[in-house]
Amino acid sequence: MTDNSSYETLFKNKTMKSYFLILFAVIVVFLLFIFRFYLWIFLYSLIFYVALRPLHELLLKYVKKRIFSSTLIILIILSLVVVPSMFLLMMLSEQIYELYGRIHFAVYYDILKHAGENKIIDGALTFFDVEKADLGERILSYFKETTMSVFASFL
């Protein structure tokens, strides 16, 4: 059998009990700090469990096996969330590519043509020893990085 004298000492001595509770609280805080990245995932999983449990029970009446019911729920969620998201991302990437093409056309044909006619810009280019093609490439790379960062922020 086990010896319960340590438990009795802990509950009889109030300072020992308070030290134990403080130590336990510190350990819990450190564990929460260590696993803080998993807390949101756990919370989302709990919400999905509570939300999808009735659907699982309903499918379980018809299917009779838990694994088939769970598989059907996963396929339903994938078809409702992932497939439309893929179509949306494909359309968004096409529009970003079209925007990039328009910016590329505008920079090469409009902005650089007018930049060569402007004496201030022409003087700045000669002062910094930068050619018009290099300026166009830098502007395009800036727009490309900006559009990619905007696109990445949506994901």
Image: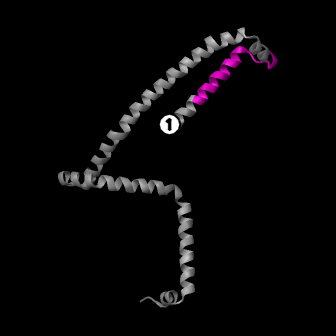
Q: Is residue 96 left or right of residue 134?
A: left
Label 1 element class: helix
Residue at (51, 88) in percent of width and height: 6
Q: Count every numbered label the image shows and give the total.
A: 1
Farthest residue to the top: give it.
117
Where does the image place residue 62, in percent across and percent down from the top left? 18, 51
Q: Is residue 150 left or right of residue 87?
A: right
Where does the image place residue 5, in percent across and percent down from the top left? 49, 91
Q: Is residue 136 magenta?
A: yes
What amino acid is at disc 1? Answer: Phe
Farthest residue to the left: give it.
62
Q: Magenta residues, as a range?
A: 126-146
Q: Find disc 1 in the rendering and name its residue.
A: 154
Mostly what secondary structure, the magenta segment?
Answer: helix
Residue at (52, 55) in percent of width and height: 37
Q: Quadrant of residue 102?
A: top right
Residue at (45, 28) in percent of width and height: 92
Q: Quadrant of residue 54?
A: bottom left
Residue at (33, 56) in percent of width and height: 50
Q: Quadrant of residue 121?
A: top right
